[in-house]
Image: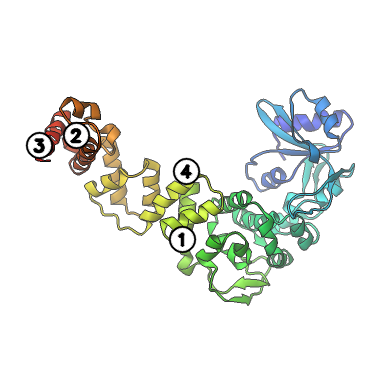
Amino acid sequence: MQIPQQAAYIIHTLNAHGFEAYAVGGCVRDTLLGREPGDWDITTSARPDQVKKLFRRTVDTGIQHGTVTVLIDRTGYEVTTYRIDGAYEDGRHPKQVEFTPDLLEDLRRRDFTINAMAYSPDQGIVDAFDGMGDLKRKMIRCVGDPAERFTEDALRILRAIRFSAQLDFSIEKHTWEAIGRIAPNMAKVSKERVQMELTRLLLSDHPERMQDVYRTGISAYISPGFHGLYGQGRQTEKVQHIPGEPQTGQGTALSGEVFPGGGGLEHAGALPRVKYLRWAAFVRETDPDTAAEILKDLKMDNDTIRKVRTLVAWAGREILPQEAELRRGMSRMEPEVWDGVLALCGCDRKIRELTETIRRRGDCLDLKHLAVTGQDLAAAGVRPGKAMGEILGRLLEHVLERPEDNRKDVLLELAGTWQDAG
């Protein structure tokens, strides 16, 4: 395995002072899969105070759980002491942790086998739970008893489905069964964390795996609005899981296809990996107000909610290949959101070419690019206030229809005519 120079330096420094140290978790998994890790975490036998003495710049990011962030070249590397987690009284976090000198004890507490591997340049890969075998089998499987792992931290239930979507893996039978049994514990998880996992799922190569959030019964414990999209009123049935095949696990599941005709996610995997666009694809079967309420329940940021509202409002419209109509649509939203509308609606090549023509020509699409301003109208005798606002609005509508008229003299003449007529 090739690891970043900085991560290797941290491991070497700890080793040189008599401590064990390994890269661990997702960075090992992703490297073995040929994927670029998002970050590199390190686990060590050194205690947090010992780690801090060995490196010049550190941050106590999770000192109570044994985590110190080592800063090298403006990049942070989390270094965590081997630990055994205590009781998870809130279904999310251990009440206390106990440090241990045993790497295997630390790996044993982790969620899935593919995340429970460690690596050091000197020792190679430590794989006590056949994570490499599960990588080859393309399988998500819990370390030890899946019911225990999910009871400890209910977010792992949703992470299992998210990983299956990101990696295109199936979920092992007993792990799938435990998801259905422990699903009610999802009510203990904060909406922010749920939303983050759902967003990662939607941004994966397989956003259609969102169906499994409904099939397993998880959706009912996320929010009424979220569940109501595809989950209410459907009968449940027992379905059999075949290891290595797409998840249909054994346990309480929604019958048939969860999303009628594929729902909003039938072609979502072909859409750009943009958060508001993938979420809009998911909620497009409802109306803009309901879509916004669902996202508010999930503590989504306001900018995403606003863009999703716009996309959902346009999702069912017929967009005609007429320049004036396209300019009117483009004038109502940011350029990237308009591009999202075209992608979401599957608009044809002609509409996309006309959009690029309008942009390349620099047609006026908003008041900021109108050839006259409020000051120009005031100088021409238009009183500031409601009347001026109405005239500016009419002028914009005029140039959306006739972009060649976006000239100061033409627009002032039009404004004068309207004022005299009014």
Give the side of residue 278 with respect to residue 81, left or right: left
Q: Which residue is mark 3?
A: 420
| Residue 193, image x, y percentages | 63, 49
Give the side of residue 420 with respect to residue 297, left or right: left
Kind of residue at badge 1: Gly
Kind of residue at badge 3: Asp
Disc 2: CA contacts within 10 A as few (<14), some (14-19) or many (>=20): many
Disc 4: CA contacts within 10 A as few (<14), some (14-19) or many (>=20): few
Q: Are marks 4 and 1 in contact (CB under 8 Å)?
A: no
Q: Nearer the viewer, mark 3 or mark 2?
A: 3
Q: Which mark is residue 414?
A: none
Dividing the picture into quadrants, the one containing residue 315 is bottom left
Q: Nearer the viewer, mark 1 or mark 2?
A: 2
Disc 3: CA contacts within 10 A as few (<14), some (14-19) or many (>=20): few
Q: Earlier in the sequence, mark 1 or mark 2?
A: 1
Dividing the picture into quadrants, the one containing residue 68 is top right
Give the side of residue 169 with respect to residue 203, left or right: right
Q: Which mark is residue 406?
A: 2
Q: Earlier in the sequence, mark 4 or mark 3?
A: 4
Q: In the image shown, does 412 or 134 lie closer to the viewer?
A: 412
Name the quadrant of the C terminus: top left
Q: CA distance from mark 4 to mark 1?
A: 21 Å
Q: CA distance from mark 4 to mark 3?
A: 42 Å
Q: CA distance from mark 3 to mark 2?
A: 21 Å
How many discs appear?
Answer: 4
Q: CA distance from mark 1 to mark 3?
A: 51 Å
Q: Which residue is mark 4?
A: 303
